[in-house]
Amino acid sequence: MISTTKSSGDSQGPRIVRIEITPVHVPFREFVRQTMEESAGGLGMAIPAEEKWQGGDFVICRLFAEDGSVGLGEAFVWLPETGISPGQIIDVTEHALSRYVLGESPFNIKHINYRMDVNVARNEVPKGMIDIACYDLMGKISGRSASDFMGGAAVSEVPLAAMVPLMDLDKMVAFAEGFCRDGIRTLRVKLGRSVPEDVRIMESIRGALGDAVRLRVDYNQAYTPDQAVHAIKGIEPFGIDLAEQPVRATDFLGMSYVQKRVNTPLMSHEGCFSLTDIVTLIELGAIGVVGINAERPGGVTNALWAIDYAEEHGLGCVIHNQSLGIGSAMQIQLAAAKHSSLGHDTDLFGHVMMEDDLITDEIDYRGGKATVPSGPGWGVALDEEALDRYATGKTVIVEG
Ligand SMILES: [Mg+2]
């Protein structure tokens, strides 16, 4: 039997000798907090969570190589969606995943993922956070952009979508028009309070913006399968690129039921965590577009696999999340490398929502596009002062 679980030693580059993991909470900008306060359920969407959403929880991961290089990773946490807390991410990283990472070269990323997967089931979010940090570390060690390890950046600017929260109709139209004045050409509109209201919203936004703007909608699990069919058919006359998570996150069969009865491609978000989820949803005929978050379905390695799998099956992909700077830079690099495979604009809105992005560099989001950061790895550096300011607990250090 071939031994595959030993660490790979130093034959492929400097080994990882230290892991630092820090929980942070970054409040939303004041105007976002006010908007949320006035919006559906204090959340800007139809998801039935009890707590108002006023900021973002994250875990920042730093991997140190023996040559002194540092790789940055980030995990986004929102319990109604991710189901895993910052404390759980830190615990499983410190006490379980770290032993399959320390002593490895980041260039052996497939082997690191294999060892994490065979020794620790599930946990796509912390595994994804580590995988993201490994790609940055490869770039830092070699002096190359991390996108060079994804096939190379095909474009220098990534077109962005923007999100319109679920609020009063006139405010939603004003938000949509404001984004388009800034150069945005794709909008994701939050729906799901009722089918007649959904129709009024989409009719008004399409009427205000005309046909040059692409529209997608996000129901955040608001409807039963039958209601979802009715709801999506009601807005199809307004030209909808895709409909995100119309039914409960875990209801894959419900998604399939809806997808077979509407022309608009569906996308799973809250219900999509692993490669198995993606394959199952595609094979069930339950989705027409694959959603990729930064750390889901397990970092860069699994995202590349999922995007290729989707393309082979004739599906497009949306890269999307409300990340801090590290996660946004990673998604911009990924979108640049896979530009020709996606078919949909990338949906990043952490820079719109969060009062700080925890990086020292400015990512250029002007004109409805994100400029791909230059420099090694993700092309961004951690703002250590901001990390201290927003940390909600001590930095956990694991060495080996
Ligand atoms: Mg969503």
Image (cartoon, helix red, strand yellow):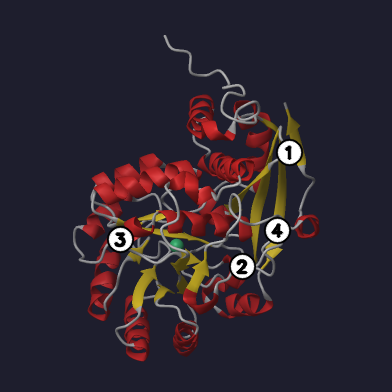
Give neighbour class at mark 2: few <14, some 14-19, many 20+ (Cα, 10 Å).
Answer: some
- 3 or 1: tag closer to the N-terminus: 1
Where disc 3 sits, the SS reads strand
Residue assigned mark 1? 68
Q: What residue is rendered at 32% in x and 87% in y?
A: 210
Q: Is the Cβ of the residue at disc 3 closer than 8 Å to that at disc 1?
A: no
Where disc 4 sits, the SS reads strand
Q: What residue is rendered at 30% in x and 69% in y?
A: 241
**Gap in Å between the C-alphas at discs 2 and 1?**
42 Å
Where disc 1 sits, the SS reads loop
Q: Nearer the viewer, mark 2 or mark 1?
A: 1
**Gap in Å between the C-alphas at discs 3 and 2?**
27 Å
Left or right, 175 with reference to 398: left
Residue assigned mark 4? 25
Location of residue 49 in the rendering, given as x and y in whole percent from the top left corner: 54, 62
Location of residue 245 in the rendering, given as x and y in whole percent from the top left corner: 38, 60
Residue assigned mark 3? 266
The response on whether ligand 1 sits within 8 Å of label 4 is: no
Location of residue 315 in the rendering, given as x and y in whole percent from the top left corner: 27, 55
Q: Nearer the viewer, mark 2 or mark 4?
A: 4
* Number of numbered discs on residues: 4
